Image: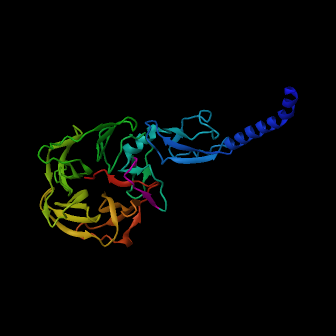
Amino acid sequence: MILKFWKKIMWPVSLLLIFGVSYLLLNQFNKETTYVIQQVDENGALLKPQTYRSGHVWRNVNYKTNISGYQLTNTSEKLPQRFGFTNETVKLTYQVKNKQQAKNQVKNAKYLGAGYAILTANTVDGFQQDDPNGRINNLRLATSNDGVNWKMVSANYPENYVRDPTPIRIKNKLVVLYTGGILTTTDLNKWTNTAYDFDNSRLKLQYVVSPDMFYDANESLNIVFAATPLNKTNSHLYVTSFSKKRINTGKQVHKITGLKMAASLSDPHIEYNNGNYYLWALNTKNQHLEYYKSTQPYSGYRKLKSVNSLAVNMLGPSVLKVKNQYRLTFNMLNSAEATVSVPYTIKVNNLNKMKVTAKHMQGLEIPTQINSIGYEPQK
């Protein structure tokens, strides 16, 4: 009796089981999973913003692995070639194709620049999201022999969060000043990070912002930077010496003073020419460029011109001397949307009669977007 009953229901039960298993398998294979693709150098620093690839289970993954100046070290066998059942993060590691060529590029270049790349946002219509939450900013180096056309440097970059860098070559070392300290390398591979060494007991500055370098009348190297004193809100500008032997700052710090200077300034640059010091800085209240002149490096400044005719907010203005001409470089900043533009440059022929208008703006000839470009100082 039981056997007859079992025989009667066996086929319907089997069909239900087959249908159920088939449904589950079909549902799993029809599921869409997402892979986060991270492309990093041998130091683990991101080379590009991470990308996302989505697809159904067992479909092929398209990695798009090419990066100029680098070659992928992961073999295709080690990378998942098809989407699995769960979301994954896939890390692609790259090595510099020609490390000696990169070292020679930095060593022999006439002009050297440094900026930072925002690795948490892609460039869309020439702008990048500059969201401070979870942002990754990595160092980028560029070289030029004419001050106009720039070439990126393929290197193993440090994993440090870098903001507002300025480079200088000292013997066999490459030194990069930035908001967080001083980066040093001899091989574009291993980097050391050192804190600023000036005496902060009297000024009680919270941290260094937008450090830049300049040569004074005696051809001595100095640093100009912005900082906010403890329990204060306005940012001021300061100057200290820099020792090429110690590769660090001097102990004494001087506050920059002058007539009719904006209450809060940042992103400074100083250029010495014919007995005068010319100071560019951003007014932090409106992100417009301020322009000052003095016969002393840190006192006696007077306002020459407030460059607000551009009607744009700026980020990281810097100046490169090319022969008898100066090139003001900056990114435009849309504070309402927290986005930064590709870098622009404006030619300046006369430091006493600087004309900065929108019609003089040109896109910087550089292969990729980098921000707050700082240049190696010229004597």
Is residue 133 in the magenta section? yes
Q: Main secondary structure of the magenta part?
A: loop
Q: Nearer the viewer, residue 49 or 57?
A: 57
Count up the numbered dots: 0
In the rendered image, the residue lying farthest to the front is 1
Is residue 10 in the magenta section? no
For the question of whether residue 322 can be seen, the reply is no
Q: Residue at x 20, y 69 (%)?
A: 304
Image quarter where the N terminus lies is top right
Residue 348, position in %: x, y?
30, 66
Residue 315, position in %: x, y?
33, 59
Query: Is 88 placed above or below 5 here?
Result: below
246 horizontally vs 369: left or right: left
Q: Nearer the viewer, residue 228 or 226?
A: 228
Q: Residue at x 40, y 60 (%)?
A: 339
Colour scheme shown: rainbow
Q: Nearer the viewer, residue 143 or 32?
A: 32
For the question of whether residue 52 can be seen, the reply is yes
Q: Residue at x 43, y 36 (%)?
A: 43
302 horizontally vs 103: left or right: left
Q: Nearer the viewer, residue 316 or 204?
A: 204
Q: Which residues are magenta?
A: 126-136
Query: Is 169 placed above or below 255 here?
Result: above
Query: Is 24 placed above or below 113 here?
Result: above
